[in-house]
Image (cartoon, rainbow, N blue to C red):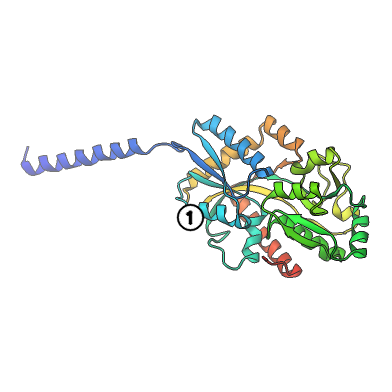
Amino acid sequence: MKPILRAALLTMAVFALGGIGNAASAEPYPSKPIHFIAPYPPGSVTDLIARTIGQKLTEKWGQPVIVENRGGGGSVIGTDVVAKAAPDGYSILMVAPDLAINESLRSKLPYDAEKSFAPVTLLVAAPMVLSVHSTLAVNNVKELIAYAKAHPGQLSYASGGNGTVAHLGMELFKQMAGVDIVHIPYKGTAAVVQSLITGEVQVAFAQMATVRPQIASGKLRVLAVATASRAQAMPDLPTVAEAGVPGYKADVWFGVVAPAGTPGDIIAKLNQELVAIMHMPDVVEQFRRQGIEPMTSTPGEFAAFLRADIRKWGELVRRTGAHVD
């Protein structure tokens, strides 16, 4: 064999072996632990959702799914962690309406709610309920409105932080009902519930899953649900619109996103697994007991949903004049 031909064949063989080596080193996803960021403090409904999903993914994939609470900044701190993470599928983020709200409420976000993330799927709808301290002398929404009008600025309401859906949901309620109730922001839903129980505040919108034990024990009184239709978990509870504020609606949802640029096949695999988990009978039963309803989607459907939510909350921010204190 001529030297030149022999050298060429040797070079081709080296490249072929290199290709085989590269193919062999391309490990299937996932091949290491996944970090699931919940940008809220511990003790909220976010934990229930994230940890249930994390356990199911761990069982399915044989790789740890580590749920990390990165609260602070109205969810901005934890959200930014994933916005800046490598787009390889090993960092995913639990998101809620805060992601959409912050686009118009905060002028200097370190990320863009649409451009910095790749939507994976919606997960659930988690309705809020309008709750009051057990000693407040009101039994329904109309009585709350009448009391607030008779005592302007004397009632206070809690939220899990500026810019949360509980904050804007109450600001919308105040505007539509024509009442003056003072906002007291806390760090997370657990603190909201505690402030209501102790009487530090008298009113709050809180997720049904979080306050149901306190309602059952008589520590809190629930007046209405914030969604457009009644919740399956509490079908006798009227909506705010039915109970005295026609047209009122404030929805809470949760979903999962990954960093922008995450490969499409990884997004598709995450979507397939998460949707399957959210339809497992034991997961559906567990969530429905808490008043949480599965609400899954394709990545494209979630992207469109998020765009619409950004517009909706942006209009509400402008209409109510809400701002970050």
Residue 58 position by quadrant: top right
Name the residue located 33 percent from the left edge and 35 percent from the top edge: 24
**Residue found at the very far left of the displayed protein:** 2
Q: Position of residue 34 (x, y in %)?
A: 50, 40
Q: Residues within 10 Å of mark 1 (few under 14, many from 20)?
A: some
Name the residue located 50 percent from the left edge and 54 percent from the top edge: 260
Quadrant where the C terminus sits is bottom right
Q: Disc 1 marks which residue?
A: 84
- Residue type, numbered disc 1: Lys
Q: Position of residue 292 (x, y in %)?
A: 73, 41
Q: Position of residue 79 (x, y in %)?
A: 56, 54
Residue 152 position by quadrant: bottom right
Element on which disc 1 rests = loop
Relative placement, left or right, of 229 versus 313 is: right
150 vs 103, nearest the viewer:
150
Count of numbered labels shown in the rendering: 1
Relative placement, left or right, of 112 versus 46 is: left
Name the residue located 50 percent from the left edge and 46 percent from the top edge: 91
Asked whether residue 127 is in view, the answer is no
Quadrant where the N terminus sits is top left
Vertically, is 73 above or below 273? below
Q: Position of residue 9 (x, y in %)?
A: 15, 40
Name the residue located 20 percent from the left edge and 41 percent from the top edge: 12
148 vs 122, nearest the viewer:
148
Relative placement, left or right, of 258 versus 284 is: left
